[in-house]
Amino acid sequence: MMKPLTSLMALCALTMTLATAAASAQPAGVDHGAMDHGAMDHSGMRHGAAQAPAPAATDHANMDHGDMGHDGPPQAAPTPPAAPPVGSLPTSDGAAERGYDSYGIHPHMMDDMPAWQVLFDKFGVSHNRDGQNALQWDGRFWFGTATDRLLVKSEGERENGEGSDGKVEAFWSHAVSPFWDLQLGARRDIGTGPKRNWAAIGIEGVLPYNIELETTAYVGASGRTALALKAEYDLLLTQRLIFTPELEASLYGKADPARGVGSGLAEGSLSFRLRYEVTREFAPYIGVSFDRKFGQTARYASDAGASRSQTALMAGVRFWF
């Protein structure tokens, strides 16, 4: 029993001695260029683990990898981190602690930039059922900023051979909300009859559904008071064709026979205009108006030989610059 075991141990010792001698005898610059890897089967090899880098002197130029089997599942490439958005703005509205200034953004409004405009909503002629022609106007001029401005308004008509009637108003207009202006100023009545001066206070703005409204109260000498209302609406039939109904009314607290005005509801008018905007600044129009005097004012008109009500055709141009 001891002899076979002694022989086996001697054989193992001899094998280890030969392997060690062969490893130490192999030169460092071994050329693997002639090695044929075509028949090597790598299907069972695990490539998921990191491999040690090959020695710098190893030449793999002539290695044949044609028959290497890489049947293992492909490894997913790492997802690169998302780049921050270019030119991103702050998420807050600027009121938070980290506002626009921290991004080098300094927003500002143009409210203090002065500007001006001349607008004639109506400038043309009319022809009533009595065969009388008249020149009509309704315009305004303003100069100032978005919050404070000088506003001058005038409207009226001049009939051929029958006198004229109109008014001129000047206001300081102050924006009290995004859609409403408070107006303080004065009015002067012009045309046939004695001239009247009034102190005026009013409000002008836009109601829901884009209805434009002007309401002005007046106080004059000798205890005279008055109230004027005006509302209009632009209905866009097309981008250039616009239909505009307009309603006006005047009330007086005291009769003024010299100017043919009675107390209470004095007169009202309803008109319809259809304009075509050749440009935004220039729009010819045609229309029809219905005017009526009421109460004591109607009696003054009858005594003067004038009609209590009147219907007229209108034509003219709306322009601004």
Image (cartoon, rainbow, N blue to C red):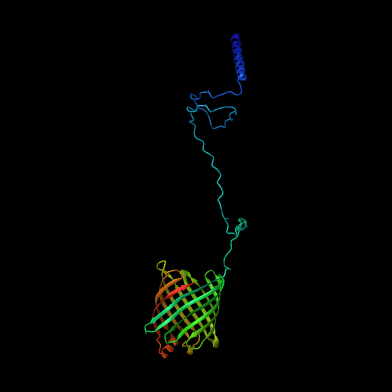
Q: Could you tell me which quadrant the N terminus lies in?
A: top right
Where residue 180 appears, as percent x and y from the top left, is 53, 72
Where residue 93 appears, as percent x and y from the top left, is 57, 59
Q: Quadrant of residue 59?
A: top right
Q: Quadrant of residue 2?
A: top right
Where residue 63 appears, as percent x and y from the top left, is 52, 27
Task: Please determine whether, in this image, residue 17 is positioned above or below residue 93.
Answer: above
Q: Quadrant of residue 53?
A: top right
Where residue 248 appears, as percent x and y from the top left, is 45, 78
Total labels drawn: 0
Q: Describe residue 56's horizontal placement relative to residue 246 as left or right.
A: right
Q: Describe residue 53's horizontal placement relative to residue 154 as left or right.
A: right
Task: Please determine whether, in this image, residue 257 is positioned above or below residue 33.
Answer: below
Task: Please determine whether, in this image, residue 2 is positioned above or below residue 261.
Answer: above
The residue positioned 62% from the left and 16% from the top of the image is: 17
Which residue is at the front of the view, 270 or 36?
36
Which residue is at the front of the view, 278 or 91?
278
